[in-house]
């Protein structure tokens, strides 16, 4: 998962008369408001979700579904994800203001003409609800109501189970709450077939086990941010050695889930899944090895990150695994798509 942290231009910014008028009157430019609402949907996360949805649809259809169904499902899925992400930003605006990584999000960044955030909380709340309603109708009317119900379930799960229930209470927050990000494959499969079958469940499992290594790597990098906001992400409450060990465990579970799909997806996909899985596991083990290795410190002595005593200086570049995980998931689902379209390569 990726996060949008780009700064927003101040409303009324610029040298032209329109900008001066906007700054003088304290009014917000419509284009800035629209852009800010768009950024609240976390579009980079949506991109990754759609990367999983389309190949799932191709696999379910054993070919190419109708363009109308693809468009309706992808748009509906994007709106549903945007709804969940916007509502998440609305609820978490207090901790987003504390965390450096999220302090430039539109609900907390004071970039408005009066020195206030560009977007008001009630506007974000309404936007999130409207996006969810439109997604429900779009999927229900143009795909089927099962896909709509699954998309709504993802929104409710992300908002109530993860954001409100788990995120600030337990280090298992992303393990359980991450299930919300697995629903797009169920939505895509249901849109094509009208049901949820075993291959869809296996794809769900792939993303479910992929999420902790992906997100824990990011949380290791921004451990201080989460600690300042009192969010008990695993890297905050456990030593780097414990986090790295769990990353390896979940990585093996993820690769096992990808290989369990081979009987349905075919041998070409199986070869790709095996190679990509080996690549991911090597990197996960390397991360664990770098964490366990002694690190030279001042005075000629050594210290080990395993103790967690100096996480910020000792933890080795976890972002390498984070970025690799995005490439891994993209390539894996590309293999799913190619296999589904090829007339050969199946058992």
Image (tube, rainbow, N blue to C red):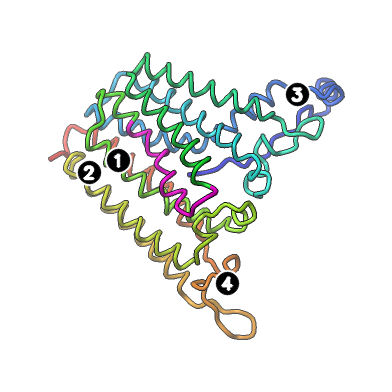
- Above or below, 293 against 63 in this view is below
Residue under pointer 2: 261
> In this image, 229 relative to 138: left or right?
right
Mark 1, secondary structure of its residue:
helix
How many numbered marks are there? Answer: 4
Mark 3, secondary structure of its residue:
loop
- The residue positioned 22% from the left and 47% from the top of the image is 260
Front residue (pair 25, 68)? 25
Q: Is disc 4 in contact with disc 2, using a CB cutoff of under 8 Å? A: no
Q: Which mark is residue 97?
A: none
Range of residues picked out in magenta? 168-186
Q: CA distance from mark 4 to mark 3?
A: 47 Å
Q: Nearer the viewer, mark 1 or mark 4?
A: 4
Callout 4: few (<14), some (14-19), or many (20+) C-alpha neighbours within 10 Å? few
- The answer to which image quadrant residue 10 occupies is top right
- Above or below, 282 against 21 in this view is below
Image coordinates of residue 101 in percent, x first then y, are: 62, 48
Q: Is disc 4 in contact with disc 3, using a CB cutoff of under 8 Å? A: no
Residue 13 sits inside the magenta stretch? no
Residue under pointer 1: 203
């Amino acid at each position: 998962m990726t996060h949008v942290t780009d700064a927003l231009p101040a409303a009324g910014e610029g040298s032209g008369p329109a900008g001066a008028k906007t700054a003088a009157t304290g009014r917000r430019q419509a284009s800035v408001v629209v852009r800010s609402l768009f950024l609240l949907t976390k579009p980079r996360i949506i991109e990754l979700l759609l990367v999983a949805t389309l190949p799932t649809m191709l696999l379910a259809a054993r070919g190419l579904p109708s363009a109308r169904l693809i468009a309706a499902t992808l748009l509906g899925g994007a709106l549903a994800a945007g709804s969940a992400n916007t509502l998440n930003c609305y609820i978490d605006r207090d901790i987003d203001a504390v965390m450096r990584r999220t302090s430039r999000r539109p609900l907390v960044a004071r970039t408005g003409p009066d020195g206030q955030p560009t977007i008001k909380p009630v506007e974000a709340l309404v936007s999130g609800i409207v996006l969810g309603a439109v997604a429900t109708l779009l999927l229900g009317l143009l795909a089927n109501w099962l896909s709509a119900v699954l998309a709504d379930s993802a929104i409710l799960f992300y908002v109530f189970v993860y954001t409100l229930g788990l995120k600030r209470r337990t280090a298992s927050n992303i393990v359980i709450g991450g299930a919300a990000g697995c629903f797009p494959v169920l939505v895509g499969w249901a849109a094509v077939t009208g049901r949820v079958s075993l291959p869809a469940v296996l794809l769900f499992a792939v993303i479910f086990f992929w999420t902790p290594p992906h997100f824990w790597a990011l949380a290791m990098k921004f451990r201080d941010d989460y600690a300042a906001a009192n969010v008990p992400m695993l890297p905050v409450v456990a030593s780097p050695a414990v986090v790295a060990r769990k990353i390896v465990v979940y990585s093996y579970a993820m690769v096992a889930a990808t290989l369990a799909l081979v009987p349905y997806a075919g041998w070409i996909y199986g070869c790709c899944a095996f190679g990509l899985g080996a690549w991911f596991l090597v990197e996960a083990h390397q991360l664990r090895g770098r964490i366990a290795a002694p690190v030279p410190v001042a005075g000629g002595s050594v210290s080990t990150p395993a103790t967690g005593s100096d996480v910020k200086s000792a933890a080795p570049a976890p972002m390498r695994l984070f970025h690799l995980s995005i490439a891994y998931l993209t390539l894996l689902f590309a293999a799913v798509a190619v296999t589904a379209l090829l007339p050969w390569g199946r058992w």
